[in-house]
Image (tube, rainbow, N blue to C red):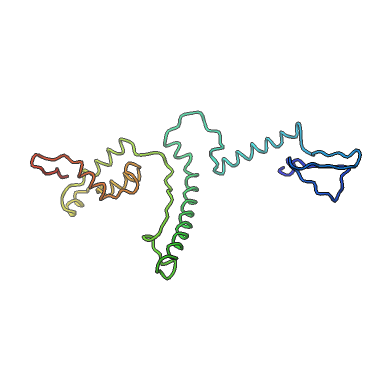
């Protein structure tokens, strides 16, 4: 269908050895009386075949992952419904991102190895050179109820020794809570737990004696 959809030029009365180029800067000229030229192409009802083929291709592309070409439903959807609908596409995209991260890391390690003292590029570790593309394509963050439940789980951890805390069944540590907040897009990327704890300490109220309150 691709080849039949392309107009094909034809001539009559022209020199067969001549090179005829198509374009606005080229003119086809001949001295033969009655010579003619034209294009072979589908017209009229023949064009509907190609239109249907294009529609079928667009639907197939939408099924294969080009979600932008698919006509979206004009109804409201919950965040959970959207997550389930695009989970398959996100898994494929995540696998591609991980493969791209590996390839970019290899290139970066080669560049690093070229300017360092390591014997081989494989000797360059992740601490020296690494690229990791984001694989979190979800726009859903933590809800207010989820934030409250996480904080309550952290607060249920008693401020006692580790042994007593284990016996009491503490639900969540501060590091675990901050990691959940980071993955839930509450904390900004790149901020460590130590930096967050330091910022929390700065914002704590000061007691009458001049000392900040402790947890």
Using the image as rendered, state which of residue 167 and residue 101 is in the foreground.
Answer: 101
Q: State the image coordinates of residue 52 (x, y, percent, origin top left).
A: 67, 35
Toward which corner of the image does residue 208 lie, by quadrant?
Answer: top left
Residue 80 against residue 128 in the figure, above or below? above
Q: Residue furthest left?
A: 209
Residue 175 against residue 72 in the figure, above or below? below
Q: Residue furthest bottom?
A: 119
Toward which corner of the image does residue 214 lie, by quadrant?
Answer: top left
- Indicate left or right for 150 with 101 as reference: left
Badge count: 0
- Indicate left or right for 9 with 172 as reference: right
- Indicate left or right for 178 with 106 as reference: left
Residue at (63% x, 40% y) in the render: 57
Q: State the image coordinates of residue 77 (x, y, percent, origin top left).
A: 45, 32
Q: Residue furthest top?
A: 75
Q: State the image coordinates of residue 196 (x, y, percent, origin top left).
A: 26, 46
- Indicate left or right for 174 with 50 as reference: left
Residue 204 against residue 108 in the figure, above or below? above
Residue at (81% x, 42% y) in the render: 28
Residue at (67% x, 38% y) in the render: 53
- Quadrant where the image shows the N terminus: top right
- Quadrant where the image shows the C terminus: top left
Q: State the image coordinates of residue 47 (x, y, percent, origin top left).
A: 73, 34
Using the image as rendered, state which of residue 74 and residue 191 is in the foreground.
Answer: 191
């Amino acid at each position: 269908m691709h080849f039949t959809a392309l107009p094909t030029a034809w001539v009559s009365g022209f020199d067969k050895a001549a090179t005829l180029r198509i374009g606005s800067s080229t003119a086809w000229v001949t001295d033969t009386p009655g010579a003619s030229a034209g294009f072979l192409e589908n017209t009229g009802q023949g064009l509907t075949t190609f239109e249907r083929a294009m529609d079928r291709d667009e639907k197939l592309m939408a099924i294969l992952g080009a979600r932008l070409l698919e006509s979206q439903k004009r109804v409201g959807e919950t965040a959970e419904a959207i997550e389930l609908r695009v989970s398959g596409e996100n898994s494929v995209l995540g696998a591609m991102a991980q493969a791209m991260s590996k390839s970019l890391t290899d290139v970066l390690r080669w560049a690093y190895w070229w300017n360092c003292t390591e014997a081989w590029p494989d000797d360059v570790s992740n601490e020296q050179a690494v690229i990791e593309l984001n694989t979190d394509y979800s726009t859903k963050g933590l809800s207010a109820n989820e934030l409250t439940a996480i904080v309550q789980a952290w607060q249920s951890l008693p401020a006692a020794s580790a042994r007593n805390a284990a016996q009491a069944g503490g639900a969540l540590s501060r590091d675990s809570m901050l990691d959940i907040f980071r993955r839930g897009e509450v904390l900004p990327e790149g901020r460590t737990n130590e930096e967050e704890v330091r910022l929390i300490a700065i914002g704590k109220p000061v007691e009458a004696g001049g000392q900040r309150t402790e947890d």
